[in-house]
Image: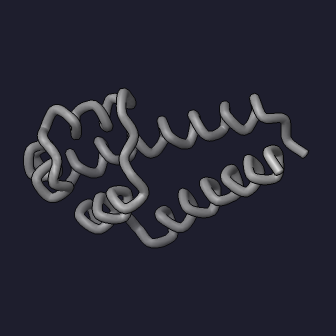
């Protein structure tokens, strides 16, 4: 069993990796932040907060972002796999 602090640390690390990757891919696609925000039906300030790690994207928004920025299916599956491992461990810890 993995201790809860390690799970939280891993979750924060994955979150930061995802945030950095969103910005990197958005810039590679030459997509303005405003365009991404419009596709997510949010204002640009909220989109900016997500990219800076001050706010979290909802699960469904992650899939919209992945589609818009043409995230490789394997990369998207990797994020899902790690996220599901963390979620399952948290459920185990609290049950």
What's the image's color scheme? one colour
Q: x, y (%) of residue 50?
A: 32, 37
| Residue in front for this viewpoint, 25 or 67 | 67
Q: x, y (%) of residue 72?
A: 41, 68
| Residue in front for this viewpoint, 49 or 79 | 49
Image point (48%, 35%), residue name? 16
Residue positioned most to the right:
1
- For this view, does 53 lie left or right of residue 70? right
Image point (64%, 55%), residue name? 82
Image point (49%, 62%), residue name? 75
Q: Quadrant of residue 84?
A: bottom right
- For this view, does 43 lie left or right of residue 85? left
Figure disc tally? 0
Q: x, y (%) of residue 58?
A: 38, 51
Image point (90%, 46%), residue name? 1
Residue positioned most to the front:
95
Q: Say if 49 sits above or below 38 in the image.
A: above
Residue positioned most to the bottom:
73
Q: Quadrant of residue 4?
A: top right
- For this view, does 34 lie left or right of residue 75? left
Q: Quadrant of residue 41?
A: bottom left
Q: Say if 56 sits above or below 74 in the image.
A: above
Q: x, y (%) of residue 48?
A: 22, 33
């Amino acid at each position: 069993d993995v201790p809860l602090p390690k799970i939280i640390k891993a979750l924060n690390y994955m979150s930061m990796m995802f945030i950095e990757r969103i910005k990197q891919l958005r810039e590679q696609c030459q997509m303005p932040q405003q365009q991404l925000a419009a596709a997510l039906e949010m204002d640009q300030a909220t989109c900016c907060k997500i990219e800076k790690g001050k706010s979290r994207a909802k699960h469904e928004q992650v899939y919209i972002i992945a589609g818009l920025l043409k995230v490789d299916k394997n990369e998207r599956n990797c994020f899902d796999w790690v996220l599901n491992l963390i979620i399952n461990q948290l459920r185990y810890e609290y049950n």
